[in-house]
């Protein structure tokens, strides 16, 4: 992704920017061989993996990075650096990306990495819309746009705000502008970070929980076959009265505990949750047994 300069890397996972924010990185073949267990141990929650560049180039480290990140139990998403210069080419590239990732387990929404090269503003918006609309129709998941702050502020129009936003700007604690979007879902704040398990500089990100795929409401059959239950159900086992709850976007353990007249500690114990501030939409919690 596009490179600028940054002062330093800061690793936190807490409630900042008015929402729960997760530490993330994004990687490609340029990241070399990665020890994802060490990455996770360095307080990284989410990794976005480049799947492809353009319409025919699969990132040579795509499959290896996916398998290794999954084995390390990191939350995974995929991004595609597109090179389309027409709407038809954009749709073709979206199909190419879809075919690469459709059988992969993924926790986070797919991303179009669009770094404009010689396009007019109107062409850029039409190409972005063609790609994102095609990808959404294939996956039944709302995708996310990645681009730099100046493009977001000066090029992308309001028609694209139905998609999520991942914005890059370095040397700041918050992007100067998110353009027509009210806020960001991902914020790449450095390209010179340092993370255990990766040699050299690393792209560093913050992500909000809006980037997690909500399988309880998604009709997607093209991605991981995560099984969701209704908001409150009994276990399918006839001999059990276990009450479960499928996490929704914006939920916290505290709000869930209050809903079911229980405690955060109790839910954490039942589900082996070590960090009560780190839960993911689409996952199912045991509320009581």
Image (tube, rainbow, N blue to C red):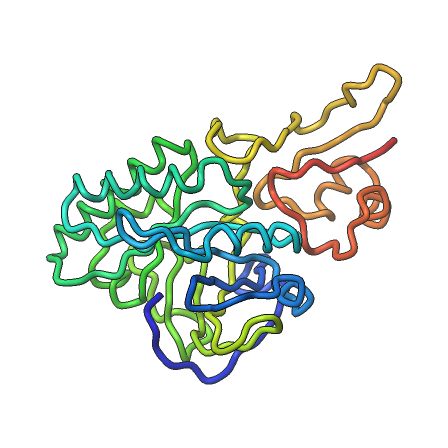
> Which residue is outermost to the top?
238
Image-based side of 174 in relation to 232, left or right = left
Instruction: Find residue 21 and report its horizontal and vertical position in percent.
Output: 57, 60
Instruction: Find residue 19 and report its horizontal and vertical position in percent.
Output: 56, 57
Image-based side of 130 in relation to 9, left or right = left
Closest to the observer, 125 or 31:
31
What residue is at 52 percent from the left and 56 percent from the top?
Answer: 65
Image-based side of 220 in relation to 241, left or right = left
Q: Is residue 126 above or below residue 121?
A: above
Q: Is residue 154 above or below residue 263?
A: below
Of the 4 image quadrants, the one containing the N terminus is: bottom left
Instruction: Find residue 44 and report its horizontal and vertical position in percent.
Output: 61, 64
What residue is at 42 percent from the left and 46 percent from the top?
Answer: 110
What residue is at 46 percent from the left and 78 percent from the top?
Answer: 192
Query: Dividing the picture into quarters, in which one does residue 261 lie?
Result: top right
Q: Is residue 232 above or below residue 74?
A: above
What residue is at 65 percent from the left and 70 percent from the top?
Answer: 42
Instruction: Find residue 245 and report its horizontal and vertical position in percent.
Output: 71, 33
In the rendered picture of this protein, how many numbered marks are placed on residues?
A: 0
Closest to the observer, 268 or 91:
91
Of the 4 image quadrants, the one containing the C terminus is: top right
């Amino acid at each position: 992704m596009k490179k600028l300069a940054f002062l330093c890397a800061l690793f936190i996972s807490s409630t900042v920017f008015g929402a729960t924010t997760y530490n993330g990185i994004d990687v490609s073949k340029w990241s070399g061989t990665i020890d994802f267990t060490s990455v996770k141990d360095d307080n990284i929650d989410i990794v976005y993996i480049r799947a492809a560049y353009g319409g025919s180039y699969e990132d040579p480290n795509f499959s290896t990075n996916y398998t290794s990140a999954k084995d390390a139990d990191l939350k995974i998403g995929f991004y595609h650096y597109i090179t389309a210069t027409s709407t038809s080419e954009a749709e073709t590239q979206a199909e190419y990306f879809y075919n690469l990732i459709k059988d992969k387990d993924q926790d986070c929404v797919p991303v179009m990495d669009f770094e404009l090269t010689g396009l007019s503003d109107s062409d850029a918006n039409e190409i972005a819309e063609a790609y994102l609309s095609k990808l959404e129709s294939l996956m039944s998941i709302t995708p996310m746009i990645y681009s730099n702050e100046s493009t977001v502020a000066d090029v992308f129009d309001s028609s694209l705000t139905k998609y999520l936003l991942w914005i890059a700007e370095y040397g700041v604690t918050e992007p100067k502008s998110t353009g027509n979007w009210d806020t960001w879902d991902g914020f790449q704040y450095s390209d010179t970070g340092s993370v255990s398990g990766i040699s050299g500089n690393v792209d560093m990100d913050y992500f909000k929980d809006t980037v997690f795929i909500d399988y309880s409401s998604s009709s997607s059959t093209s991605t991981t076959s995560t099984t969701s239950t209704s908001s409150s159900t009994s276990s399918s086992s006839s001999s059990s009265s276990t009450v479960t709850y499928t996490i929704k976007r914006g939920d916290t353990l505290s709000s869930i505990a209050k809903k079911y007249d229980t405690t955060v500690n109790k839910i954490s114990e039942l589900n082996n949750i070590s960090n009560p501030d780190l839960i993911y939409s689409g996952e199912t919690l045991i509320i009581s047994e």
